[in-house]
Image: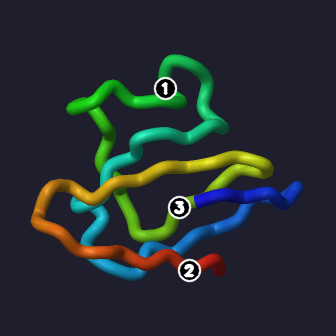
Amino acid sequence: MINVHWEERAFEIREGEPDEWLRVADTSLDSPNDISEPGSEPRLSGLTYLVAPRCVVILKSAPTGSRSHDFRIS
């Protein structure tokens, strides 16, 4: 998810359950929390993710096979 706006934006994850999603990176967080070590990515607690202004968030789905996921800005 990429937010190039000067205000935070809520992204809705439209597929799966929160615990199926892992946060790989969030450039709004202080180091070392901005990028997760492989295998230690935190699971999401909800299906809406607030992306800070001018920041990037990378999520990945927990291994459950090959499927694509959709996001929607709200």
At 33% from the left and 79% from the top, the residue drawn is 15
The CA distance from mark 3 to mark 2 is 10 Å
Front: mark 3 or 2: 2
At 36% from the left and 75% from the top, the residue drawn is 69
Q: Position of residue 27 (x, y in %)?
A: 62, 37
The vertical placement of 63 against 39, above or below, is: below
Q: Which mark is residue 33?
A: 1
Query: In which quarter of the view is residue 36 placed?
Result: top left
Q: Quadrant of the C terminus?
A: bottom right
**Secondary element at image label 1:** loop
Q: Position of residue 7 (x, y in %)?
A: 83, 59
The CA distance from mark 2 to mark 1 is 25 Å
Viewer-side residue, 44 vs 60: 60
Mark 2 surroundings within 10 Å by alpha-carbon count, few (fewer than 14), some (14 through 19), many (20 or more): few
Q: Which mark is residue 49?
A: 3
Circle 2 residue: 72
- Horizontal side of residue 22 vs 2, given as left or right: left
The vertical placement of 62 against 32, above or below, is: below
Q: Are marks 1 and 3 in contact (CB under 8 Å)?
A: no
**Residue at the right extreme of this rendering:** 6
Q: Position of residue 43 (x, y in %)?
A: 30, 48
Mark 1 surroundings within 10 Å by alpha-carbon count, few (fewer than 14), some (14 through 19), many (20 or more): some
Viewer-side residue, 45 vs 54: 54
The CA distance from mark 1 to mark 3 is 16 Å
The vertical placement of 6 against 17, above or below, is: above
At 78% from the left and 49% from the top, the residue drawn is 54
- Name the amino acid type tagged 2: Arg
**Residue at the left extreme of this rendering:** 64
- Name the amino acid type tagged 3: Tyr
